[in-house]
Image (spheres, rainbow, N blue to C red):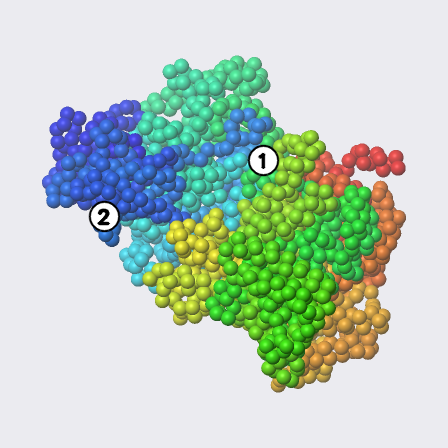
Amino acid sequence: MDGETASERVIHADSGRGHDVGGEARPGLDALCLDLGVALEYEDAWGQRTVVPEAKKRDIVAALGYPVADQAEAAACLADLRAAARRRILPPLLVVQGGTPPLRLTANLPAEFVGRTLPWRIVLEDGGERSGVVVPHPVPADLTLPDSASPGTPVPDAEGSGDDSRRPTLLELPIDVPPGHHRLLLFEPAQPPRELASAALAVCPATCFQLPRPAPQCVGDRLWGPAVQVYALRSSRNWGIGDFGDLLRLVDLAADAGAHVVGVNPLHALFPHDPARASPYSPSSREWLNVLYIEIETTRDYGECAAARQHVEEPAFRQRLEALRATEFVDYGGVAAAKFEVLEMLYRHFRSVHLERNTQRAGLFRDFQREGGRSLRAHALFDALQERFFRLDRAVWGWTVWPEAYRDIDGPAVEAFALANEERVEFFEYLQWQAEAQLRRVAARAQARGMAIGLYRDLAVGVNEGGSETWARPKLHALGIHAGAPPDELNPAGQDWGFPPVIPQRLAAECFEPFLAVLRANMRHAGALRIDHVMSLMRLFWLPTDRPRRVGAYVAYPMDELLGLLCLESRRHRCVVIGEDLGIVPQGVRDAMARYAILSYRPLYFEQDWGAGGFRAPRDWPAQAVASVSTHDLPTLCSYWSGFDLQLRDRLGMYREPGMHARQLERREADRRALLAALAAEEGCGEGVGEGAGTDPARVADDDPRLAVAVHRFIARTPAAIAVVQFEDVLGQLEGVNLPGTSESEYPNWRRKLGAELADIEVDPRWRAVSAAVDAERPCPLRELSGGPADFHPETAAIPRATYRLQFHADFGFAAAEAVLPYLAELGISHVYAAPFLKARPGSRHGYDIVDHQAVNPEIGSEADFDRYCARLAELGLGQVLDVVPNHVGVLGADNEWWLDVLENGEASEYAEYFDIDWQPPFPELRGKVLLPVLGDQYGLVLEAGELRLGFCAERGEFSVHYFEHRFPVDPCDYPSILTPAASTRGAQSVAAAEQVELETLLAALRHLPPRDVADPALQTERRHNKNLFKQHLAALHERLPAVRARIEEQLAAFNGRVGEPASFDALDALLARQAYRLASWRVAADDINYRRFFDINDLAALRMEVESVFEATHAQIFRWLAEGRVAGLRIDHPDGLAEPVAYFERLQARHAAICRELALARGTPPAGPEPALYLVVEKILAEFEPLPAEWPVHGDTGYRFANLCNGLFVDSAQESRFSRIYRAFTGEARNFSEVLHEAKLLIMMHSLPGEVSGLAGLLHDIAQHDRRTRDFTRSRLRGALKEIVAGFPVYRTYIGPRGVSDTDRRYIERAVASAAARTRAGDATVLRFVRDVLVSAPTETAAELRPLKLRFVRRFQQFTAPVMAKSMEDTAFYRYNRLVSLNDVGGDPHTFGIAVQDFHAANERVAASHPFGLLGSSTHDSKRSEDVRARIDVLSEMPGAWRLALRRWRKLNERHKRRVNDALAPSCNDEYLLYQTLLGVWPATPPDGRGLAELARRVDAYMLKAVREAKRHTSWMNPEPGYEAALSGFVRRLFAGGLDNPFVADFLPFHARVSCFGCYNSLAMALLKLTAPGVPDIYQGCETWNYRLVDPDNRLRVDFAAARELLHGLQQACPDGADEATRRNVLAAMLGAMSDARDDGRTKLYVLWRALAVRREFEQTMRFGRYVALETDGPAALHVVAFARVLGDDIVVVVASRLLFTLCRGDASLLRDAAIWQGTFVELPAFSEGRQWRDALCGQGVRPECAGNRCRLDVARLFGALPLALLVPQRERAVASREAG
């Protein structure tokens, strides 16, 4: 880019290609070398110039791909190269710097095109295009051209030569192209234009990513952090090698100290078959990871795989791990053996449990494979092949010595191996997936902790010759050549680094893709990347390996192109770049690093003013740098100070020249003196070092920790952007991690562990002193992070402490709610979470069918009632979160004025744009009409039965057709046809003349009313105005003139016909045919509906919330309430139905901000800082792996995900296979949930939503017609492809819009298409790809007529996938797949049979980092089962044997109750299985009396009827099967018949009692976790006590608030605030005794909620903003404990809960009273817990941790008393004192 050729960058004396300085022609070989970038001479460390021998030049030229035997061949080769260069118009890749237009490019054009107009087009990477014309001009002589050619692509002569005369030309494109990877096309000036040339085009930023300005409290731009060798980390949990789990803990340790960066060694993939090859700088592949870093015990599969856990827990295996941990050096062989032993088990588990069942995790893995592509496959194949050959012959060290047939990655032998060993190859892919996930978690933790950089990764300069990277691209590497360095003082023979260099010409030919791939792989999950030996971007020293290696040659690389691409990737990944620029560094490299904002690497040892003989003062260090004391290749501080490194080199014979050791010792002594002088010169740096030592090194002990503090304070004081601290220097370690120039037999390179465990380092005084010193010099508090876009500040909102959901309806209105509010305030609730209470359809029990957005629902209360309710909220200090329904409104009926206006006026209605109506559907009969599928039978039959009646509203003066509760307005243009008598009856009319005139005048005016299909806006306005005037006039005539009344009555009678005379209905039929709607049977809706609905519910019509007027009309009242303070936050219902959810949320936040500004101005106090955000939570159902979109300005979701996550803790994943066998044996259901779900999706699309599928296919067909390559795709083929893609969609929807397509959405689409392709292999894959391409290309489509079509399709598609998923999964598959129905809930995945504690922690950490203020749910109005029902059913997972026997008994007892229906026994075994689980879940805790038993039977009967209809197998809502439903109802009723004397009930109750007791403990633990995890806990009405309700309407039954209030008051009296430990324990013991004896009325659960809510109030800031810290457990019962802390400053709240208690107690709940079951089980506390005291907020006891050495822990046996839960809060002196005073 600076105009200098590649070779000129190396030998500046060579001024021309092929000529020497004086102009004399070079010999052929030298000229060829110069053109290929091979330097003819070089300087060594002493400045001595060495001319490269001719043999070496030939070797190197041959390695570059141009073997020549003599000068003549060299000259011929050069001529060929130059000829090829002249023929090529553009290089494969143009690398240019973006910025201000014009965009300047160079091309080697044929002379005939110079000066002529050439068309061009740039295809942007996002699919968009730029195009235009350009006139090429000769390159001006004084213009410095960007060097876009790589070495070996000579610049053609300016005059051209030969027949193919070319000219270097300048193309100036007057456009601003965004940075990215695009494609340039040039065309000949012909008609039509023909492509002349094309090239990849990389438009790069001017510099690498630079850190944004830090917070104001930071000092400058300077950050710091530790740098470590990951393998060297020690901990009590790892398996003898530092791993990603240790790295995760290191991130926390560093963040606690104030660090913003954690540096690590290269994490590249090494050689699993031979783990002793440990150098991270000689990897197999730099694109993949070292799998030995996997922390096995925190993987999801380890938590699921009981066999693996049992194996690891075996004493012999534990002894192996202890031995591996105890060694001084990493025993790579032993570590690998232990890890692979277990990893093999985990892969087998994953394959059988996930891959074979196509679970969500299987989908994630397939995504990883797909995105890893050829690179991942090649690496895994390599590992599998190398493992095979190494097993056969241990001398096979790499692919270069494999059998010849396997050296070609694309050869048939490799293909055959891959097919025969698919699982083994997949195993290695699985390992990479696990490693990637753990590294991602580490990076996420760093981000969550607010680190500005986070991980600082290291990129090795090359790869091992026998590794996977060279095998995958052998022609890219100069095999037979090694990279190295010329001789220097320590290496007089030069250095051979042992790896083959990349061939620059081939790198350029591949458009630098290998370089980009490596950058992307290493910038992923990194905030900074160190480029090892950054000089390699300019040149590398090549050493032929078959000759003496003292002499080689520098080979040039296209530095500016590489740096430009580096800048581009750096910016894209927001990754700071650091160049390791030690050694011989050409000035050109340093200049380029400064120009491109690459940080220099500056160890203290080298920062000396060699002339002055002293160390540079901190102020003189460069700012664009990383400062350190040492590096992995240099001696540790202790070694440097003591001279140990020099002694070691001497002992190993590394000094090859006499006197060199003595000179080094002499120099070191001078350096030590100079260092002491430099420290003394800096105020505060030298204090305490060697007490009065002055500059005498002898007076400073080698292990003096104060020296480490001093030197780190010194480097921290420099202006360097980053300062790094090595633990080896802090801990005073003598031996370094690597000694360059030695072999493994000479020195244990890359094996030495740190001298202390991480837990010890955390509290080590040396670390604390160094970190405190560095942080004092570079203070920069960690950033406060939360989810959403960068300019969104969620913490500024009025965030609830806890919410309580109230369901408003006619039986529970504002007055009833007002009476409940004091109880909620006493309980500790801060906000009422209100169901919708705007005016809804009459009789609505849920409020989601709003018909008027400006009024409260009169069935709930009047405006005055609402005022009193809001006033009471304010009086009690309670806020209110309102449930908002933006997606749809209630229609049909006769209540929604907007909808009625649309029916009356069609497209001319002012509300027509409010609804998502297709006015031009493919059916001619519906053009300009709305289909109204409301009739109970066929239209003609309903009409002739007289059920459709024309009527007149005298008050409004309008005609309507009525059908039961429905009203269908008549177009006023048709009033004359109604009021004008037929000719046969006209004479019988008796309207007086004057009255006749008035009526006829009105009818004449109505005849001139503009029709509803008029397109002119002015005429539409006229129609809207006049129609109302005319109706008012008609109403007045009707009231005033009896004759008009008579005329109307007569005409109504005529139109309404007579039953039995079909012809009498012809007039009404004709009238209806002219309306803006078509009445039809409800069965027509599925096929022909042309307005978007909420799912498939006809009377809920979707709104177009993206229209400004719709938004304002639906939210005006809500904004008024926000301004008045009556509403504090909003819950958004079903945002997935909106066209652009993000735009809707932004609009809400913007309107709220405007309200706040207006209020502030009115108060005269403009707000300081960011405007307060609106508290906004969204009902978004997230898949297990799915995050909330980061660009949404919301606080979180409504808690479905947490509810399922928390519930999963209480399902025993170890029993999954046994439970699955029981389910299959009882029901005969052998399919997994994926298959059931896929079938359900196809069913829904076929029977419930076929019209939507056809509509989408029609849109796709229209798009396909725009391209001759796709116009043959028929609607049928497109419909089939759509159905399969939607059936394979892994999430509810994507969020593609005009703003673009996210990588996440691309991934979901790719997965869906891959799933469709796998299921329809016989189908046409091109159609699937077409659908995919339309989806991802819509935002960037440039064709004016095609863009709106594509965006419309995308919008419709996204609004379609969500209802398909919801209807198929929640309302179908959840009722078909009944293995363990506690898993079948909204937001859940029945595949996931329980989760491990570490997965629970990981999920909470993600929430804490992204959306810490979202709701935490456990039960909602949409839950399939309440939390307590699920908690009971979860217990079954722990007792599969007892469950199997119970099923066997119950089937035998009840088989006589079945009936034969349609040749099969009813109910089915699957429904019977569901029924037994349901009974276990809902049976009351206290035995019911006769009335209670009857009510229970009614509820279960109603539920089972709903369940089987939802399942749609034996009956359905659309097609009920009376016989099956009667048989099912009879079966249920007979189970209850006889009450306790029923044999089934007698057998059922003891089993239920065992389940119920442990279910209660599950519920208590769930409640505690919900109330303390990151987020806002939400309590669904009635769930503060035991609540055994099922899906609606069962969960909307009346709540006895009076009884709950009485229970709370009883608890407050028995256990008031400040009650001592004994009182609390007695109260708890009594409650738990009642619970065990089935006498509990819910007070135990109420007590836990009440006390936990009190803690949330007392420690509100800690619970709202505190960091989530997972606490490890240890001991025999560790799997039964989940513990975490919430940490904010000095406040630490500790939560400890129990799980899987049935297993722990072997089914005997009485054992929970015996502390012995917890004996030896501990909760590990953070190191800073020493000296702290807590009190248990539940039982009142004081708690002090056991601390020994540097570890603190809680003894669970002492912590858990009667209640196996603990909520520990800081023991505050003032709190103690106040209680004592009371």
What residue is shown with label 2?
A: 188
Which image quarter: residue 1268?
bottom left
Q: Is residue 1149 left or right of residue 54?
A: right
Q: Which mark is residue 783?
A: 1
Q: Secondary structure at mark 2?
A: loop
* Residue type at the position of mark 1: Arg
Give x and y (percent) for residue 1726.
Answer: 65, 40
| Apparent side of residue 870 relative to residue 1032 in the rendered image (left or right) | right
Please state if 825 lies on the left or on the right of 278 as rendered. Answer: right
Would you say residue 1268 is visible in this rendering? yes
Where does the N terminus fall, quadrant-wise? top left
Vertical placement of 1778 versus 182: above or below?
A: above
Secondary element under disc 1, as helix, strand or loop, is: loop
Query: Is the residue 1245 above or below the residue 1612 in the image?
Result: below
Picture quarter containing residue 1096?
Answer: bottom right
Q: Position of residue 245 (x, y in %)?
A: 55, 45
Amino acid of disc 2:
Glu
Q: Circle 2: is it few (<14), some (14-19), or many (20+) Cα within 10 Å?
A: some
Sequence-first disc among 2 and 1: 2
Task: Give the residue drawn at x 52%, y 64%.
Answer: 928
CA distance separating discs 2 and 1: 55 Å
Q: Residue at x 39, y 48 (%)?
A: 128
Task: Give whichever of 1520, 483 is nearer the camera.
Answer: 1520
Residue sitting at 37 percent across and 41 percent down?
Answer: 177
Q: Is residue 1575 above or below residue 1032?
A: above
Q: Nearer the viewer, residue 884 or 1587?
A: 884
